């Protein structure tokens, strides 16, 4: 067999495993490619696993963008690309940042979501949420976007009511996201 012909055959044969491994790596990384990624990162619904946070889409439209938990330089991001948006009624989950690794830090939560062809921001602020970290995006009557979550204790930002329960109790909070007009339509 001629070596020149073997080189071409070997080069072509090497591409198949490489393509399969790249696709498998992307799915395992939770990039949202295919349904396997969603199933692989969604936490179990029974047992109340407190080491996950979730973003639910109840806006009536598909959404894309980012939602992130950040503690110091550690992040637990969710990126929903425009070509594969989160459908109405869907949700994505990510692991929480370990409190053991960051015992004296409160998580920052921030978002940058494309809804109704506009970009909406949840500015990065300290927000104490329940261990489960369930965020639900909903449309409000004025055409904007709101987020609802269960907040715990005394929240360190200006819109917190004056009489929140003690740190062991929780209350459901809703906040308007701010339209980011500087970036234009999405």
Image (cartoon, helix red, strand yellow):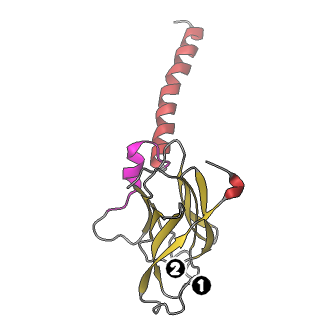
The residue nearer to you, when weighing 88 against 25, is 88
**Residue underneath mark 1:** 156
Q: Nearer the viewer, residue 111 or 38?
A: 111
Q: Is residue 23 magenta?
A: no
Does 116 sit above or below residue 122? Answer: above
Residue 30 in the image: state x and y as whole percent.
47, 50
Callout 1: 10 Å neighbours few (<14), some, many (20+)? few
Q: Residue at x 30, y 64 (%)?
A: 45
Q: Is residue 33 above or below residue 68?
A: above
Measuring from the top left, give residue 117's x and y in whole percent: 57, 49
Residue at image position (56%, 63%) is 68
Q: Residue furthest right?
A: 182
Q: Residue at x 56, y 74 (%)?
A: 107
Q: What is the count of numbered marks?
A: 2
Q: Which residues are magenta?
A: 31-44
Residue farthest toward the left in the current orientation of the protein: 46
Does label 2 or label 1 sit earlier along the sequence?
2
Tell me: 104 left or right of 90. Answer: right
Q: Residue 130 in the image: x percent, y percent?
A: 44, 77
- Callout 2 secondary element: loop
Disc 2: CA contacts within 10 A as few (<14), some (14-19) or many (>=20)? many
User: Which residue has dot 2 on it?
Assistant: 128
Q: Residue furthest top?
A: 2
Q: Nearer the viewer, residue 67 or 140?
A: 140
Residue at the extreme front of the image, as rendered: 142
Q: Is residue 56 left or right of residue 162?
A: left
Q: Eyeballing the image, is 31 above or below 113?
A: above
Asked whether disc 2 touches disc 1, contact meaning CB atoms under 8 Å apart, the reply is yes
Q: Which mark is residue 94?
A: none
> What's the distance in space between the residues labelled 2 and 1, CA to CA?
8 Å
């Amino acid at each position: 067999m001629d070596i020149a012909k073997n080189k071409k055959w070997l080069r072509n044969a090497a591409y198949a495993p490489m393509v399969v491994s790249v696709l498998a790596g992307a799915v395992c990384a939770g990039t949202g490619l295919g349904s396997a990624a969603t199933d692989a990162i969604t936490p179990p619904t029974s047992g109340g696993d407190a080491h996950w946070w979730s973003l639910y889409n109840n806006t009536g439209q598909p959404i894309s963008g980012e939602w992130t938990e950040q503690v110091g330089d550690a992040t637990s991001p969710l990126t929903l690309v425009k070509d594969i948006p989160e459908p109405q009624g869907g949700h994505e989950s990510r692991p929480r940042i370990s409190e053991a690794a960051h015992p004296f830090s409160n998580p920052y939560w921030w978002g940058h979501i494309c809804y109704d062809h506009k970009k909406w921001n949840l500015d990065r602020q300290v927000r104490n949420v329940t261990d489960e970290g369930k965020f639900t995006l909903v449309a409000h009557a004025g055409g904007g976007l709101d987020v609802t979550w269960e907040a715990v204790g005394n929240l360190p930002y200006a819109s917190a009511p004056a009489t929140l329960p003690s740190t062991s109790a929780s209350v459901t909070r809703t906040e308007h996201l701010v339209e980011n007009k500087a970036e234009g339509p999405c």
